Amino acid sequence: MMNIIKRFWLPIILTMVTALTVVACNPLEYKSKAAQVPQLVQGLLSDPKTFNYPLSQDADSSRILGLAYEGLISQNPLTAKLEPILAESWQISDDKLKFTFTLRQGLKWSDGQPLTVDDVLFTYNDIYFNEAIPTDIRDGFRIGESRKLPTLRKVDERRIEFTLPEPFRPFLLNNSVPILPAHILRESVKTKDSEGNPLFIKKWGIDTPVDQIIVNGPYKLERYVTSERLILRRNPYYWRKGTKGETLPYIERIVMQIVESTDTSLLQFRSGGLDSLGVSPDYFSLLKVQEKQGNFKIYNGGPTTSTSFVFFNLNQGKRNGKPLIDPIKSRWFNSVEFRQAVAYAIDRQTMINNTFRGIGVPQDSPISLQSPYYLSPKEGLKVYDYNTEKAKQLLTKAGFKYNEKSQLLDSEGNRIRFNLITNSGNKIREAMGAQVKRDLGKIGIQVDFNPIAWSALTDKVSNSLDFEAILMGLTGGLEPNDGANVWAPEGGLHMFNQKPQAGQKPIEGQQVYPWEAEIAKLYIQATQEFDEAKVKALYGQTQRITQENLPFIYLVNPLALSAVRNRFEGIQFSAIGGAFWNIHEIKITD
């Protein structure tokens, strides 16, 4: 569950000068100059930040590297079932503490070297579980209250055994993380720089010649031109074969065109320069009427796995003797009636109709609607349908009052006014923030809405903690434990009451509410339980607690829409995997 990992994401709208620059290097021109091979042309909103997967946090880098690497297993986005990938099978001991994976025979890296059990040992022990390497992946393997990591043992040349300190249900799914080449990276992990950090941290940056990046997935990096394009070529040593023994994937080359603007991506798609396009609400009507003429189809995967929400800074601690938040405002924010009143006062249906052009549904839970652990309103999930009268009643009950101008005051006569920030350049989010400002004005609350740069926003969320209220979102999946770092009080994304991270200044007097601790406890219990009905009940209770206490006030979940040229055969679109999750079996018909 930023988006963040859960991960953050945001298109930036550029000027027409940028659009003209991109048109000048239209992929159509590239097609005419290049050898005519089966290829897919897609857009990237920015240059990748790294080619080092464990250090990757931006969506574009992860998207590229997702085509280049595979792990032991994977989760089918249509069925949610776990499927063998580099491992052909696995066994689980009766006590649920030992997991033994058997690798496929004949696996190779893109340089032709064998991919072995030693690569698996290296990937986990030397990289993912190495505290000297700053990777988010490690948090997903920390188990129970002890937060211990599994241990690994090489059984033989094809089998590897993981031993867990206690049962941990999500463990299998976590093993979809990529396996990395020991013969290329081992020396960079062992060797330290002048500050004592492994050289691996600086390995495989975007200035690395792409032929030095060794992979195991369907595609390898072939060429990268900054601010123009990145090209991936079919990996000749990829393990999958077609039904007739033919080399997979069928598509020979993928061109990632860097367009740096959602508006420019639209222009490129409409002109035929891109083969696919994520369809935002403001583009849907325009593209829908052009489907037949443009020879493409708009796929609808239902609600996305992303969330959007407003949250207040509930941290009551101090830094250097100074409160992080004005104590007066902190009292408002830490009133559950205040947060519930705000939730009732936001007209989410109008937000769907206007900002999302009807292409969305109300969001009421931190767990994705597609997840088997989602608790629906029919099953008892509390929802906050638009009701200004109920909002005002809650405020009055909590000791707030109105003056003769219908302005909301606290019990000491202070005007209720706070600052709401979001990331500038995201048109959808800016429109959502503007509506929140208007809606809360109707119950007497003055909101100062100020979009700021993404870098400044993330610094406030994770470092300075200098904010009052924020509008943003997270991206998740089917397994709620992917968002455990959001709900653990010590987690790196426990944004509404964030503890200082490593290297940051300490906070004195921070308090953790009982409901926060209870959510964290339930998340741990859910990982220890293997009876699916009981797992659903545990996660159901977490959703009841979050909706009662509203650390996040959820807003709208947009629909996952993507336009894809009709010449691609085998598209199985889903909100989780998108259009090309099964890239290895997709064919081009012309």
Image: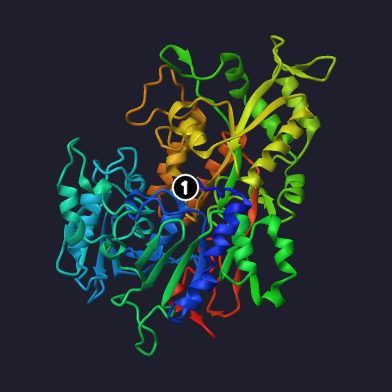
Question: From the viewer's perspective, is residue 375 above or below residue 309?
Answer: below
User: Does 174 appear above or below 577?
Assistant: above
- Identified at 49% across, 81% down, the residue is 587
To which quarter of the image does residue 210 belong? bottom left
Q: Quadrant of the C terminus?
A: bottom right
Residue 131 or residue 524, whichever sits in front? 131
Q: Give the percent coordinates (x, y) of residue 35.
A: 43, 81
Residue depicted at 67% across the width and 38% down the height:
433
* Left or right: 282, with 96 as reference point: right
Q: Residue at x 76, y 34 (%)?
A: 439
User: Seen in the image, is 170 located left or right of residue 400?
Assistant: left
Q: Name the spot of residue 71 as percent of width and height, x first.
A: 33, 63
| Relative height, residue 579 to residue 65 (above, below) | below
Using the image as rendered, state which of residue 387 and residue 446 is in the foreground: 446
The residue at the point 50 percent across, 64 percent down is 577
Q: Tag 1: residue type?
A: Lys
* Visible residue check, residue 87: yes
Crowd band around label 1 with a 10 angstrom C-alpha radius: few (<14), some (14–19), many (20+): many
Q: Tag 1, which secondary structure?
A: loop
Above or below: residue 255 compared with residue 396? below
Q: Is residue 40 left or right of residue 111?
A: right
- Quarter occupied by residue 96: bottom left
Q: Position of residue 248 (x, y in %)?
A: 38, 80
Colour scheme shown = rainbow
- Which residue has dot 1 on it? 6
Along the line of sight, the residue nearer the viewer: 488 or 376:
488
Most distant residue in the right direction: 404
Q: Nearer the viewer, residue 123 or 367?
A: 123
